[in-house]
Amino acid sequence: MDGNSGPVVGHTKLEILKQHRPAFLDPSKLPWTPWVMEGTNFKLLNIDKKTGGFTILLKVDPGLDTPVHGHLGGVEGIVLKGEFGYDDDRGGEGCYFYEDAATRHKPDSPSGTIMFATVYGPIVGYDDEGGVAGIVDARLMYDLAAANGAADHLAHLADFPS
Ligand SMILES: [Fe+2]
């Protein structure tokens, strides 16, 4: 022992480790991209290629009648404007919401809403007969945003299998 040895943690000089991309993004600089239901638009903030999930700002026009959808992963977010909900379970501006994985529901928003949401797995859209009408995952979200010129900040994640 030379007096300088000891627990590594106690003698490690902490260095600042910068991440490989900017931490901040101003979503006001991104255009809204039309989403899978007419009357809905999104701004893609991030994608998770491990889960197929994604993080978005979602804007829903007033009075939209959404089809039933289900979640393969949970969802959590914050209502930024307006309000939405499912029957009597509703939240307005500033409310946090959480939707369980395996939830199947039909939200409505008479006044329209803008929300921030992180979706931890793909969303399943159903048709009127209960069949799967479509899957919304990170790949689709990236492709839609990129086609609208709104995914340059995520280009480093764009190496999906073809
Ligand atoms: Fe949902």
Image (cartoon, rainbow, N blue to C red):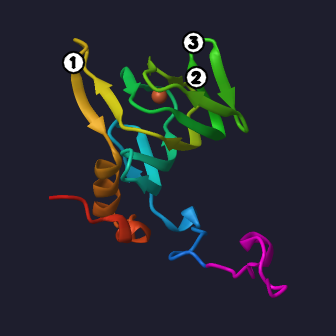
Please report whichever mark, 1 or 2, sits nearer to the chain's N-terminal start: 2
Of 161 and 59, nearer the camera is 161
Amino acid at dot 3: Asp
Q: Secondary structure at mark 2?
A: strand
Of 120 and 15, nearer the camera is 15
Query: In the rendered structure, which segment of residues is drawn in magenta?
Result: 1-17
Chief secondary structure of the magenta portion: loop
Most extreme residue toward the bottom is 2
Specify whether 135 is left or right of 9: left
Mark 2 C-beta to ligand 1 under 8 Å: no
Most extreme residue toward the front is 1
Residue under numbered circle 3: 87
Residue under numbered circle 1: 131
Quarter occupied by the C terminus: bottom left
Most extreme residue toward the right is 3
* In magenta segment, residue 52: no
Specify whether 105 is left or right of 85: left
In three-dimensional space, the C-alpha distance between marks 1 and 3, rounded to whole angstroms, equals 23 Å
Q: Position of residue 115 (x, y in %)?
A: 58, 42
Q: Position of residue 119 (x, y in %)?
A: 47, 40
Query: Does the CB distance between marks 3 and 2 fall below 8 Å?
Result: yes
Q: Secondary structure at mark 1?
A: loop
Residue under numbered circle 2: 85
Amino acid at dot 1: Gly
Picture quarter containing residue 28?
A: bottom right
Of 53 and 30, nearer the camera is 53
Q: Residue at x 81, y 88 (%)?
A: 2
In three-dimensional space, the C-alpha distance between marks 3 and 2, rounded to whole angstroms, equals 6 Å
Relative vertical location of residue 44 with respect to residue 81 in this rendering, above or below: below
Quarter occupied by the N terminus: bottom right
Specify whether 38 is left or right of 18: left
